[in-house]
Image (cartoon, rainbow, N blue to C red):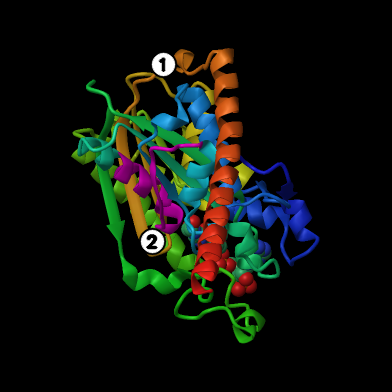
Amino acid sequence: MYVPKQVLTNGDLAQTVDTSDEWIRTRTGIERRHVAGAGESTAQMAIEAARAALRVADADPRAIDLIIVGTSTPDHLMPSTACQVQNALGATRAGAFDLNAACSSFVYALAMGHQAIASGEHRLVLVIGADTLTRFVDWQDRSTCVLFGDGAGAVLLRATEGPAGILATLLGSDGSGGDLLIIPAGGSALPPSKESVEKGLHYLRMNGQEVYRFATQTLAQATEEVAKRAGLKPDQIDLIIPHQANLRIITTAAKRLKLPLERFVVNLQEYGNTSAASVPIALCEALEAGRINPGQNIVLVGFGAGLTWAAVALKWSISPARAVSPAYRVWWRWLLYRWAGIRSRLRQATRHVTVWLIRLANRIGHR
Ligand code: UT7
């Protein structure tokens, strides 16, 4: 996982917009958020998170078959953030694409990564959730700017024969709610223009109450449904890692599922809503805190704009003790990343020289 160093507390926000620490805490549970600074972007955070995942899994970037980046805030409309990750890792064998299901993107991507392995086509799939929504919020709009933070989280999926791993997946959408959480301009419907910028149409707009109603229903329903598909009753789920939008949403889901809140991973007080990154960041923190152990049934569940929702039920199989790379392998990967940078620049230079040579040949031919 990766989160920016720059922290913005509720108190900091209260100095710039009409809000208070008390309002934000009681209505959302959020206390602070990490905000991308100069030089930080979705791709840069995704690359850092991917390198951390490769370190923990002790894997070689050149063995990755597929990279899926779940994001709704890519660095550019094109190329994809996944291609930027592929280039920075030197993942020379990998296909790469972005997947946008807003805050559900990571869980969607995880389900897709699982299918890619289950099809037999791929053996090692890198799945990343990364978002920089703070670049798309209106910092004068107190109803949205207090909610979001930035970050990235990544996991590596590996083909195994064992009984553990992903047990069931669930994907859902309801496009009739598209207007409830939307960035109106910047796409093909409303390309950037002086007018769109003046009207602030590049900022995120949200009908908070409607999204809240949708989220409270969806979180419990999706968890219950994916558990059922995995052959589990809700009380057989050891840990639920939900999208971190609002503590009240998670508390309501816990009540509906008749499960104690302790069964849920909650870290939104530190990061706010990091969109696609929230579930993988919570997964990493739960792992580091020793809350995840082999044999446990875990449900990851996301919801967000679209409207979309997604859930994955899995049986954890990796012992945390195994998740340490020997030092020489860390150095080896460091060298590979340096080489990836050199290789990328060499390929760019070769392209420039080739174009130059073709132009020269054409000019000589015309004489
Ligand atoms: O990841 C995407 C999914 N997004 C979500 O899940 C977000 C879902 N929605 C929510 O979490 C909640 O609806 C919010 C946290 C966004 C808002 O909480 P709420 O309890 O639904 O508040 P509200 O929108 O009903 O607003 C209540 C009052 C309003 O004032 P009046 O009209 O009662 O005078 C707002 O203007 O709170 C006011 N308000 C604020 N006051 C201080 C709204 N934002 C703020 C603020 N500080 N930051």
The residue nearer to you, when weighing 218 against 243, is 243
**Looking at the image, residue 235 lies above or below residue 307:** above
The location of residue 105, given as percent across then percent down, is 41, 52
Q: Quadrant of residue 113?
A: top left
Q: Amino acid at mark 2?
A: Phe
The answer to which image quadrant residue 152 occupies is top right
Q: Which residue is mark 2?
A: 214
Q: Residue furthest front?
A: 367
* Extent of the magenta region: 90-113
Helix, strand or loop under label 2: helix
Q: Is residue 165 above or below residue 127?
A: above
Label at residue 200: none
Residue 93 within the magenta-colored segment of the rendering? yes
Foreground mark, 2 or 1, reads 1
Q: Quadrant of ligand 1?
A: bottom right
* Rendering coords of residue 357 (x, y %): 54, 58
Judge from the rendering whether residue 299 lies leftward or rightward of residue 59; answer left or right. Answer: left
What is the number of callouts on the image?
2
Q: Residue at x 54, y 49 (%)?
A: 350
Image position, residue 43 (x, y; %) = 56, 49
In the rendered structure, the answer to whether residue 32 lies left or right of residue 177 reads: right
Residue at the disc numbered 1:
319
| Placement of the N terminus among the 4 image quadrants | top right
What amino acid is at disc 1?
A: Ser
Instruction: Give SS at disc 1.
Output: loop
The crowd level at tag 1 (other Cα within 10 Å; few <14, some 14-19, many 20+) is few
Relative to 359, 155 lies left or right: left
N-terminal label among 2 and 1: 2
